[in-house]
Amino acid sequence: MRSPDRRPAPTGEFVLKARVMEPADVRRALTRVAHEIVEANKGTEDLVIVGIRTRGAPLADRVAAAIASFEGVDLPSGALDVTLYRDDVALKGPRRLEATTVPADIDGRVVVVVDDVLYTGRTIRAAFDALLDMGRPRAIRLAVLVDRGHREFPIRADHVGKNLPTAADEVVKVHLEEIDGEDAVLIGEYR
Amino acid sequence: MIKHLLSMDQLSAEEITTILDTAESLRQVTDRPIKKLPTLRGRTVCNLFYEASTRTRISFELAAKRLSADVINFSADSKSSVAKGESFKDTAWTLEAMGVDAIIVRHGSSGAPHQLSRWVKASVINAGDGAHEHPTQALLDLFSIRERFKDLEGLKVAIVGDVLHSRVARSNVKGLITMGAEIVLVGPPTLIPKEAQTWGARIESDFDSVLEDLDVCYLLRVQQERQAEQLFPSLREYASLWGLDNRRMQTMKPDALVMHPGPMNRGVEISTEVSESTRSIILDQVANGLAVRMSLLYLMLGGRSEVDEIPLEAIAQ
């Protein structure tokens, strides 16, 4: 029988293998991503920054703040909880929901979706559906702090903080000041 | 999460909080242009109603549809198999054979949902059983109160009227006490059950004496057929002693709320002026019922049916 989900269930203890990004690395990567977003859009017009909960949300706020600092424009930003759109609800059961705070009007806008780790692409697929239920953006772009590969859907990021080749049984953890008390990207595995 | 919701006894304060928090997130969907989520696609929910209901049935139906579940409505009326003499058990097995995932049941007999839950594999939600319980009403009431007061701990709540025959009162007393509220039951002594003293609530027959301390005044519907049983002398006397009119409302604190589960008897337990005043959150209760029922359906059905129950504490992480 085919395995419904090849990702290992997080059992046992997380064993750290390496810290691959330190606070300064995270800051530089996000600053570059923020510049890239504005450059690719040829300015800030129509941009909306939306972070995927949990850790995409503070990242979206930081990207929006960075753009505000060098462009002098406060872009509308918000957070998206994609739990109810996931394709594994029936498999994994209900999870705690968090508030969705996407700016009211995304029709005709360029929505930049921000997340911490791009992996299978399933979360991003869920985010597309969630956004399309809220309006009709002119375009959706994707910015991530880490792309760790192993895509299961034909999805790619427009802006990547760091490409991080990993094995499927490894676990990538992003820590953020706002949630975890420090900025760092860790690789490890559950044993 | 729990497999069945039969009574408020089942739920701890933590579980109630998870249900209400989830409802708060789901309520946002109501403000969107597309008021639908794909979460329960492929699931089937059956409304099995042996008693008349408008708001509860519609609220459950809409909640299930907003989550993309399929809905079947079965009313045990003159056109149904029940009129042909089908037993409750055979109806249950018929629904089971059709593969429903949840049965929302309202029945005139106390304990009918418990019985049903022993016969079927589907999840059973009690939508009112006799004079026993109506847990989803209590949850939506808790949600509506929490929306105004943030914390339920220490709130003073009066539940007024026909407590004896009220499943809404029983479920609300349990839920409110679990959440730390203080309750006073007010009404004609003939309509306050003897065992109410064991519920952890205070009992009072003089409505005016409790009003000034209240944070919430919850009025129960007067079931008019009770007058025929001579449990109170007349509707007019009921209204003058236990009805909430403008004069009584003015003696309440300025931020105190007025609630009613509906349908209302205007001019009996509540005056039109009170029901339409700014303190009345009766329509909020209806709107919140939808979000709370969506939350329950998501938490109860949002997993593979053959998987063991997922503890609510795990979801809260």
Image (cartoon, coloured by chain):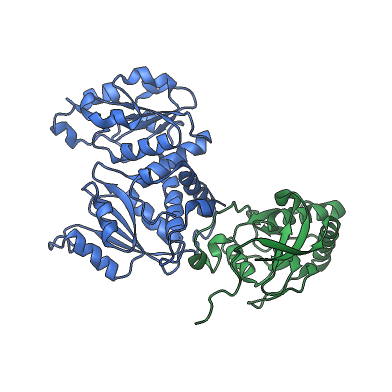
Chain colours: A green, B blue
- Quadrant in the rendering for residue B60: bottom left
Q: Is B312 left or right of A137, judged from the image as shown?
A: left
Quadrant of image for the N terminus of chain B: bottom left
Observer-nearest of B247 and B215? B215
Residue pictured at 79% horizontal, 52% vertical: A65
Q: Tell me residue B96's x, y (percent).
A: 28, 67
Q: Is residue A113 visible?
A: no
Is residue A44 placed above or below B281 in the rendered structure? below
Count of numbered labels shown in the rendering: 0
Q: Is A155 left or right of B164, judged from the image as shown?
A: right
Q: Is B82 left or right of B24, judged from the image as shown?
A: left
Residue pictured at 70% horizontal, 50% vertical: A179
Q: Is residue B218 visible?
A: yes
Query: Which residue occupies the extreme bottom position in the image?
Result: A1
Query: Which residue occupies the extreme top position in the image?
Result: B209
Observer-nearest of B210 and B277? B210
Q: Tell me residue B41's x, y (percent).
A: 45, 67
Observer-nearest of B197 and A169? A169
Q: Tell me residue B6's x, y (percent).
A: 33, 50
Q: Tell me residue A37's x, y (percent).
A: 80, 64
Residue pictured at 38% horizontal, 33% vertical: B275
- Quadrant in the rendering for residue B97: bottom left
